[in-house]
Image: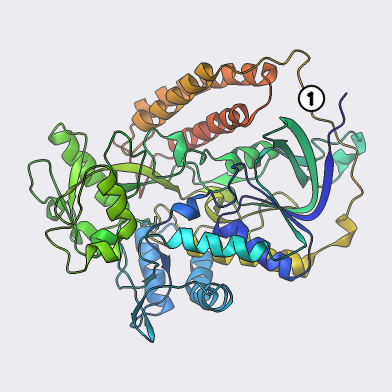
């Protein structure tokens, strides 16, 4: 059997959005040997990179208690109070010390000595720091640049995580069953050579982001298919709250725009939603109108679309904005213009899109999962901060706080006893006669997964739709498993295996929870 190339590191970080990058920076400063892998060729490709709105801090008339109240109200009261407390009290300090002082991130200012705070749905005050409408891009680029300055950090782009390595599961030694299960690294596919490497790590941090791309319409990049949830589930870590998938109310409705986000900060600057015949409608649905929590706005749009038999509604910024639109939203302005829409003069056709998974790998205040050696940070994790629905612009902050805390925890508990010489584990199995993958099969499987999730496990769910989804997805899973065993390994084949697993995790969690709440909306 072909022996895989093996690497060894103190900390393996899978994913390089704000959560993975914060963990890496903190670990690098403490002198650990760190390997970061990302499956895309561009290191910066992540949900963070596409985040437009901003990052929550504390505004001038604000305090942690007020932020906590907004988070818990939006999350419908099932948030983890300890986690909400950590985010609200430590978050703004880390924004100041890491993002502003250390990385020199140029957040917008309203005057030479005061930062500009934006408003979004569910927030009782203006408290969101931003760099116009490309906040995530700047943050991501600054982190990547800083990480490149550390010789103890190895950045491996173009590498797809296939499965977490665990003892006893992958061990050849039968007596390892008497030991506590532990994650000891990952099988990783080199996308170019199509060979699987083994990376042994004393600690592994999952920072793989979310899973919006298992839905037909999503604001996430197409790579956000939930690799981390699928791998953690197969490795035996606890996964919770997967039914709470948040839909962003406003992505651009255009054949070629592929889920381009129209940030909630437009509504924060006064933009109003209108039906196809030009009538505002949010006043019929929520007291806070356009600034109600996302799940409420999304359902109102869904209802209006259904009632008027339309595929979209309009977002009108031009008639209501008191700001210079081109200056405040240059990226959204330019992108919409490319599709023939001048947002300074006309309304934007919008439609909801899958945006954020509030559930994930259950972790504590330090990012520790239920499996030894495995941490999870950012969207792939469930700290409990978000409860049933996430408050806008808290995700970058959660990634920053838990990424940093996970690395701090590892640094203060690093156990050299666990520094293994490469344990005797099973080599990767390649089928004897590897079949080239037929892209038509992969595409069709993805169409089936995405439309099943959108129609049956989407914005409005019913027990019948969910049962149908589970049956169809289970059937598909059998076919994909068979295909996976015979096909030549590549990143698309691995992605399909992860994706079907995640679709089933969401659907099964939704079936298991009969209470309609937050972003899990059930109609009987
Ligand atoms: C947005 O800009 O609307 C997205 C911000 C978020 O998801 O928190």
State the image coordinates of residue 354 (x, y, percent, origin top left). Answer: 38, 42
Q: Residue at left 62%, top 21%?
A: 481
Left or right: 497, with 314 as reference point: right
Q: Nearer the viewer, residue 385 or 450?
A: 450
From where the camera sits, is residue 365 visible? Answer: no
Quadrant (top left, top right, bottom left, bottom right) of the N terminus: top right
Asked whether mark 1 lies closer than 8 Å to ligand 1, one says no
Q: Nearer the viewer, residue 176 or 283?
A: 283
The number of callouts visible is 1
Q: Residue at left 51%, top 41%?
A: 224
Quadrant (top left, top right, bottom left, bottom right) of the C terminus: top left
Quadrant in the picture for residue 307:
top left
From where the camera sits, is residue 521 visible? Answer: yes
Q: Nearer the viewer, residue 244 or 259?
A: 259
Compared to 492, does 211 lie above or below?
A: below
Compared to 415, does 9 lie above or below?
A: above
- Label 1's element? loop
In the image, farthest residue toward the bottom: 113
Left or right: 356, with 420 as reference point: left
Left or right: 514, with 230 as reference point: left
Mark 1 Cα shell of 10 Å, populated few (<14), some (14-19), many (≥20) = few
Quadrant in the picture for residue 292:
bottom left
Specify the quarter for ligand 1.
Answer: bottom left
Q: Residue at left 68%, top 16%?
A: 486
**Residue bearing the label numbered 1:** 429
State the image coordinates of residue 186 (x, y, percent, origin top left). Answer: 74, 42
């Amino acid at each position: 059997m072909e022996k895989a190339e093996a690497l060894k590191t103190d900390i393996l970080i899978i994913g390089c959005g704000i959560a993975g990058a914060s963990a890496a920076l903190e670990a690098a400063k403490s002198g650990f040997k760190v390997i970061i892998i990302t499956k895309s060729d561009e290191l910066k490709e992540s949900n963070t990179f596409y985040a437009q709105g901003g990052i929550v801090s504390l505004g001038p008339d604000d305090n942690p208690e007020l932020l906590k109240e907004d988070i818990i109200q939006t999350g419908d009261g099932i948030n983890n109070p300890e986690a909400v407390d950590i985010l609200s009290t430590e978050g703004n300090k880390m924004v100041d010390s890491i993002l502003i002082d250390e990385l020199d991130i140029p957040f917008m200012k309203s005057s030479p000595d005061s930062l500009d705070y934006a408003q979004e749905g569910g927030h009782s005050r203006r408290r969101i720091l931003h760099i116009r409408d490309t906040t995530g891009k700047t943050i991501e680029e600054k982190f990547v640049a800083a990480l490149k300055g550390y010789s103890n950090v190895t950045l491996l782009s173009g590498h797809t995580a296939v499965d977490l390595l665990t003892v006893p599961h992958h061990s050849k030694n039968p007596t390892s069953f008497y030991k506590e299960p532990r994650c000891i690294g990952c099988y990783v596919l080199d996308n170019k050579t199509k060979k699987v490497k083994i990376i042994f790590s004393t600690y592994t941090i999952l920072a793989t982001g979310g899973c919006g791309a298992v839905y037909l319409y999503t604001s996430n990049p197409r790579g956000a298919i939930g690799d981390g949830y699928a791998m953690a589930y197969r490795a035996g870590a606890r996964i919770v709250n997967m039914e709470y998938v948040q839909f962003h109310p406003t992505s651009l409705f255009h054949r070629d725009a592929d889920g381009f986000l129209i940030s909630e900060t437009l509504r924060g600057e006064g933009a109003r939603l209108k039906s196809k015949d030009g009538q505002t409608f949010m006043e019929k649905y929520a007291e806070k109108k356009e600034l109600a929590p996302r799940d409420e706005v999304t359902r109102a749009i869904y209802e209006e679309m259904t009632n008027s038999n339309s595929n979209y509604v309009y977002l009108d910024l031009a008639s209501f904005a008191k700001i210079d639109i081109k200056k405040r939203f240059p990226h959204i302005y330019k992108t919409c213009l490319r599709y023939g829409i001048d947002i300074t003069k006309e309304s934007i056709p919008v439609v909801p899109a899958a945006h954020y998974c509030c559930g994930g790998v259950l972790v504590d205040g330090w990012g520790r999962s239920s499996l030894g050696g495995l941490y999870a940070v950012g969207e792939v994790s469930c700290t409990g901060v978000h409860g049933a629905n996430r408050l806008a612009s808290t995700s970058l902050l959660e990634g920053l706080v838990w990424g940093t805390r996970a690395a701090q925890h590892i640094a203060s508990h690093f156990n050299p006893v666990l520094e293994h010489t490469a344990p005797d584990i099973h080599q990767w199995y390649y089928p004897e006669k590897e079949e080239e993958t037929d892209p038509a099969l992969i595409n069709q499987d993805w169409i089936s997964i995405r439309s099943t999730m959108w129609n049956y496990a989407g914005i409005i769910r019913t027990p019948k739709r969910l049962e149908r989804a589970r049956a169809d997805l289970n059937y598909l899973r059998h076919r994909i498993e068979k295909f996976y065993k015979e096909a030549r390994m590549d990143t698309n084949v691995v992605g399909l295996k992860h994706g079907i697993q995640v679709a089933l995790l969401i659907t099964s969690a939704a079936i298991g929870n009969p209470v309609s709440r937050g972003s899990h909306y059930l109609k009987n």
